[in-house]
Amino acid sequence: LVTSVAPDDATPGAFYTHVPKRSMYYEIGKDAAVCGYDFIAGSNLRGIKDKKGNPTDLMKYFVENNVAVVRGTDALETIDSRRVVLLNTDSINTGNIGYTIDSIPGVLTLPVMTEACLRHLQKNGRDRFFMMVEGGNIDHASHANDGATVIKETLNFQEALKVAYDFYLAHPDETLIVVTADHETGGMGLGNNTVGYNLRLKYIDYQKMSKSAFSRYCKSLMRDRRVYRWEDMEEYLTDNFGFWKFVPVTQEQTAKLKEDFERCLVLRNGKDKKTLYDNFDEFSQTVFDIMDKATGLGWTTNGHSGGLVPVYAIGVGAEKFASFNDNTDIPKIILDIVEGK
């Protein structure tokens, strides 16, 4: 089980635990220790601390069940345990491994974890195995309505898929790859009333940081005692989003940015917007609304939508997925293929 978010989150957890609430991280972690999977990878285990921030005995529980818990792929070379939990090198942030667009040095990436999982399974002599690889950061960025980050995470997921596809090319007669999602998030659409039919996705390459990272930066300015001028923010937006220099920003939008900057970051009179995984200051909302208008992206919600999701398949039995499917049918079809039905 490999994910770019926490390995005790909903999607990976659904493969090994049965608890009443997805927030029962300690209980989920205990199930991970005894579930029997060879390899589990993700950001961090949230059950190692209780709600008050005090350490629990969860790590001891993994040791008692002969599970090696390591941080970073280099540590994998030093162990010989059959069962491994691979966690991120960043032990502070728990929600995900960090966004691709933020280029955080040293952290795990989904392609690296996927490759490490395959190597570990082969080292263990697994002739038959099942892998679930989740690009969970796509969902997190979609909850934030952060288009460029969603696209960069999807491209990163494609790199992880290439690792699996290369394995398929080496074993075409015994491999099945299925790519799908449990839901769409954000109601992301291509086209809005600003650009009409002229989608301008090229502008996303001028965005150098995620909405989460930018909002953290803005909140740090609010906590800082020094005076931060509008001219400083103009320069920052040009450097990190291409505003004015590459991405068109109207006079009206510039006036709105300056007004919100003064109200939110100088007078500290803005309101945060809470989403499932983050809180965003009001000025950041304005910046990303302008970015969306420029690129042509549109959103309907900060939650999950009812939009159809694609199902792609290649390999043994792939033709069985060539129709509309209820999501609960996917594992049944996979099992039928495994059993030769």
Image (spheres, helix red, strand yellow):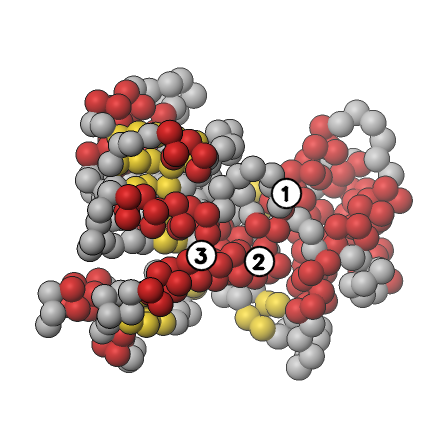
Q: Nearer the viewer, residue 178 or 280?
A: 178
Question: Callout 3 environment at 10 Å: few (<14), some (14 to 19), or many (20+)?
Answer: many
In front: label 3 or label 2: 3
In front: label 3 or label 1: 3
Question: Callout 1 environment at 10 Å: few (<14), some (14 to 19), or many (20+)?
Answer: some
Q: Alpha carbon of mark 3 to alpha carbon of mark 2: how far?
A: 13 Å
Secondary element at image label 1: helix
Amino acid type shown at disc 2: Lys
Amino acid type shown at disc 1: Ala
Secondary element at image label 3: helix
Disc 2 marks which residue?
152
Residue 37 is situated, as x and y percent measured from the top left of the image, at 23, 42
| Image quarter of the C terminus | bottom left
In the image, residue 110 sits, relative to residue 337, either above or below, namely above
Amino acid type shown at disc 3: Ala
In the image, residue 58 sits, relative to residue 237, either above or below, namely above
Q: Nearer the viewer, residue 12 or 24?
A: 12
Which sits earlier in the primary sequence, circle 3 or circle 1?
Answer: 3
Q: Is residue 242 visible?
A: yes
Residue drawn at (22%, 62%), measured in percent from left and top? 331
Q: Is residue 207 left or right of residue 48?
A: right
Q: Alpha carbon of mark 3 to alpha carbon of mark 1: how far?
A: 24 Å
Disc 3 marks which residue?
160
Residue drawn at (89%, 44%), measured in percent from left and top? 231
Residue 129 disc label? none
Residue 213 disc label? 1
Residue drawn at (35%, 61%), measured in percent from left and top? 167
Mark 3 near mark 1, Cβ–Cβ under 8 Å? no
Residue 165 is situated, as x and y percent measured from the top left of the image, at 39, 64
